[in-house]
Image: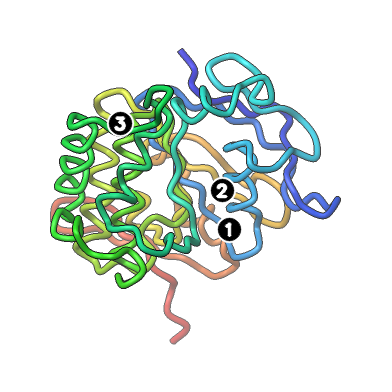
């Protein structure tokens, strides 16, 4: 079964293609990470996969159907995302913001039930943010707002979760815990694709990696095959070295110039 497909996909904006030749298949329980230097088109790719902008070429399919054929409400039941930038709505508490993730599942009146509120509180607790339920979202830090966005996406109960730099503004503990929560959901059947900048967090989280640079796909495949010194050196334009922890796990870092 395939959740998401990109076929001969090219993405861009203002009539300009920034990334082309993307061939991608994401299945349930897979966790893809997109890596690449700034300006490589990672966020533009996510927005195109989400249907927020049209591809400059090729096609995106969700559940075997062209993305363009999906009704917006039906699409919102299948796909959730954590955006890179977010301006919280004035006057909404953390709980109210997370409850917005239930909107695609509500009836004609659009009013959340007691069960919906229970799910929202459970999602907040899942991301260690239940203490933010009663606080105004506009008064929270960037990291705290990130946790609310993740909880909102999880309570949406999607088949596919797209995340654009979900660990930005988070301290190290919450970076690890955020990716752990997504990994646990993926183990239950969720498909996930995330843009990350931290190579070692990517290695801990991902089952598959897509590397993009200078408008093209540099490499893609299972994480243990793609995350190597030579591919990372080519991706970032700096020599990379791989060391190993006492338990044998690889750790990547730029090679010292000394």
Residue matched to label 3:
186
Tell me the element at label 3: helix
Q: Position of residue 168 (x, y in %)?
A: 39, 64
Q: Quadrant of the N terminus?
A: top left
Q: Residues within 10 Å of mark 1 (few under 14, many from 20)?
A: many
Q: Nearer the viewer, mark 3 or mark 2?
A: 3
The reply, left or right, for residue 47 in relation to residue 125 is right
Instruction: Residue 158: name its quadrant.
Output: top left
Tell me the element at label 1: helix
Outermost residue to the front? 109
Q: How is the image coloured?
A: rainbow
Residue 29 versus residue 16 in the image, above or below: above
- Residue occupying the point 20% across, 48% down: 124
Outermost residue to the right? 15
- Residue occupying the point 34% across, 58% down: 92
Q: Position of residue 45 (x, y in %)?
A: 62, 45
What's the distance in space between the residues labelled 3 and 1, CA to CA? 27 Å
Pointer 1 or 2: first along the chain: 2
Which numbered disc covers residue 211? 2
Q: Quadrant of the C terminus?
A: bottom left
- Residue occupying the point 40% across, 34% down: 103
Q: Position of residue 10 (x, y in %)?
A: 75, 40
Pointer 3 or 1: first along the chain: 3
- Residue occupying the point 18% across, 32% down: 114
Pointer 3 or 2: first along the chain: 3
Of the pair 215 and 236, the residue shown nearer to us: 215
Residue matched to label 1:
235
The reply, left or right, for residue 55 in relation to residue 166 is right
Of the pair 184 and 128, the residue shown nearer to us: 128
Whether the residues at callouts 3 and 2 have beta carbons within 8 Å, the answer is: no
């Amino acid at each position: 079964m395939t959740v998401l497909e990109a076929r001969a996909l090219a993405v861009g904006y203002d009539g300009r293609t920034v990334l082309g030749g993307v061939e991608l298949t994401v299945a349930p329980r897979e966790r893809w990470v997109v890596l690449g230097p700034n300006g490589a088109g990672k966020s533009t790719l996510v927005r195109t996969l989400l249907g927020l902008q049209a591809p400059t070429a090729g096609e995106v399919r969700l559940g075997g159907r062209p993305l363009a054929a999906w009704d917006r409400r039906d699409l919102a039941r299948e796909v959730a995302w954590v955006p890179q930038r977010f301006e919280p709505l004035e006057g909404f508490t953390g709980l109210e913001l997370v409850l917005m993730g239930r909107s695609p599942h509500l009836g004609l009146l659009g009013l959340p039930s007691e069960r919906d509120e229970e799910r929202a509180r459970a999602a907040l607790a899942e991301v260690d943010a239940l203490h933010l339920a009663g606080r105004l979202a506009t008064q929270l830090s960037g990291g705290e707002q990130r946790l609310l966005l993740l909880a909102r996406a999880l309570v949406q109960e999607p088949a596919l979760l797209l995340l654009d730099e979900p660990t930005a503004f988070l301290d190290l503990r919450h970076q690890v815990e955020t990716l752990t929560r997504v990994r646990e959901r993926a183990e239950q059947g969720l498909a996930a694709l995330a843009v990350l900048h931290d190579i070692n967090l990517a290695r801990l989280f991902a089952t598959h990696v897509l590397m993009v640079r200078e408008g093209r796909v540099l490499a893609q495949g299972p994480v243990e095959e793609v995350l190597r010194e030579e591919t990372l050196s080519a991706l970032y334009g700096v020599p990379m070295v791989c060391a190993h922890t006492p338990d044998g796990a690889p750790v990547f870092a730029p090679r010292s110039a000394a």
